[in-house]
Image: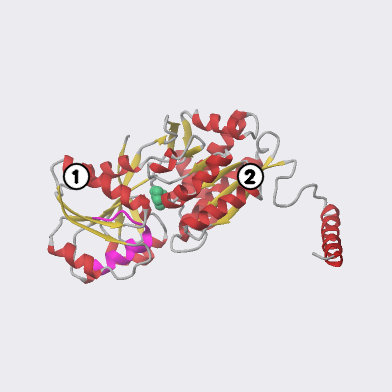
Amino acid sequence: MNIPSILRSLLATGTLLSLYFLGGCSKPSTGAAANEILIGHYGSMTGSTATFGQSTDKGVRMAAEEINAKGGILGKKIRIVTEDDQGRPEEAVNAVLKLINQNRVTAVIGEVASSRSIAAAPQCQSARVPMLSPASTNPKVTEIGDFIFRGCFIDPFQGAAMAKFAMEDLKLRKFAVFTDVKNDYSVGLAKFFKEKVRELGGEIVADESYSEGDVDFKAQLTSIKGRNPDAIFLPGYYTEFGLIARQARELGMTVPFLGGDGWDSEKTFEIGGKAIIGSYYSNHYSPDDTRPKVREFVKAFKQQHGQVPDAMAVLGYDSMYMMADSIRRAGSTDGQAIRDALATIKGFEGVAGNITMDAGRNAQKSLVVLKIEDGNKTSFVKSVEP
Ligand code: PHE
C-alpha cells in the first residue's frame, strides 16, 4: 500500500466511524451492543430444504420476541442473527464461523438437518460456543463434543418406532427401503429401521438408493416394484419424497410410503399431491394435539405467519426458550456456564413435549405417528414414549 492509499483508507474508516458514533452505536454492528445478547441461527433459508431454515427461523424469532417483550434475559434483550447456509454442509461451516468470529454470538441454534450440523458443530466445539440443534436426529451430531446439544429425539428411537408401528399396528411384513445416500440422517434412519424390522421377524425385500437433487427415480422404483413390498420406507426430505411418491403411482404402485420427520413441510402436500395420501411418518409434534401450550402456539403462529406451524417451527421456538432458560440459570453469557446449564435441563415444558437432557446431550422425548390425509393435512395416529 502506498501513502496516499493508506490515507484514503484512514479517511474512509474515519468517516465510517464518525457516522457510526453519530448513529449512537458504541460497538460495531456485527457484535452485541451492551444491552443485548446475540444468538446465532444458521439454517437453509434457501435451497431444496428452504422450509426447514425458514420455519425454524420463524419459531426462533417468535420465542425471542416473546422473551424480549417480558424484559429479556439478565437485563438484556435477545437479538437473533441468521445466516443462510443454502442447505449445503460447506456453507454451514462458513455460516457458523461468521457467527462466532464476526458476530461474536453467545450461543448458536441450528442446524436442523443432520449433515449440516455434523459439518459445522466442530467449529462451535473448538470455539467453546454452545450449539443447540432443534431437530437434527442423527446420533453423530451430539457425539462431536460436550458443547453440542439437541432439543429432539434421535434416529435409533425414530427408526425402531416406525418399524414397530408398521409391523404391529399396520401388520405389514415385507419392506423396501429407499435411502438418500448423501444424507447422514437418511442413511442412519434406514439402518435403524432395517435392524428393528429384522429383529421383529420382518423382511427387507429391496434396498435402493438415490441422492438429494435427483429427479428421476423410475429405475429404482421399477426394481422395488418387482420385489412386491408391503410398504416403502423412505427416510428422506420432503422434496424427493413428493417426487418419488408421484413416480411410484405413475408406475402403478399403490403401497403406502413410510418415513420420518424429514417429510415435515408445508411443501410436502404441494409436491406430493394425491400420491402421498395414506402414507405414515413419525414426527416431533402434531398440530392436532389438544394440550393448551400447543393450541396457543398454533394459534399465535397462524396469526403471525398465516400457516399451521410445522415441526421445525415448533422445535425452533422450543430451542430458543431452552437457550434463554439456560442463559438465565447460568447467570452469565459465559460459554462454559451456559453449556453446564443446557446439560442440566430437566422437565422443561416445551410445545413439542417435555424435555430432559440425557448424559449424551440428547433430549428424551416422545414421538408421534401421523397419517397424510386428503385435503393437505395430517391426522394424529398415536404417540410413542421413549
Ligand atoms: N431430523 C432431520 C435430520 O436430522 C431434520 C428434520 C427435523 C426435518 C424435523 C424435518 C423436521 O436431518
Report the disc number at residue 197: 1
| CA gap, disc 1 and disc 2 | 44 Å
Query: Which quadrant of the view contains residue 124?
Result: top right
Does 114 appear above or below 127? below
Q: Does the residue labelled 2 lie within 8 Å of ligand 1?
A: no
**Residue 220 visible, this angle:** yes
Is residue 238 highlighted in magenta?
yes
Query: Which quadrant of the view contains residue 269?
Result: bottom left
Q: Where is residue 20 in the image (x, y as percent from the top left)?
A: 82, 55
| Highlighted range, magenta | 233-248
Please state which amino acid type lies under the numbered disc 1.
Val
First in sequence, mark 1 or 2: give its number.
2
- Label 1 sits on a secondary structure element that is helix
The quarter of the rendered structure image containing the C terminus is: top left
Query: Which quadrant of the view contains residue 206?
Result: bottom left
Q: Which of 331 and 275 is in front in this view?
A: 331
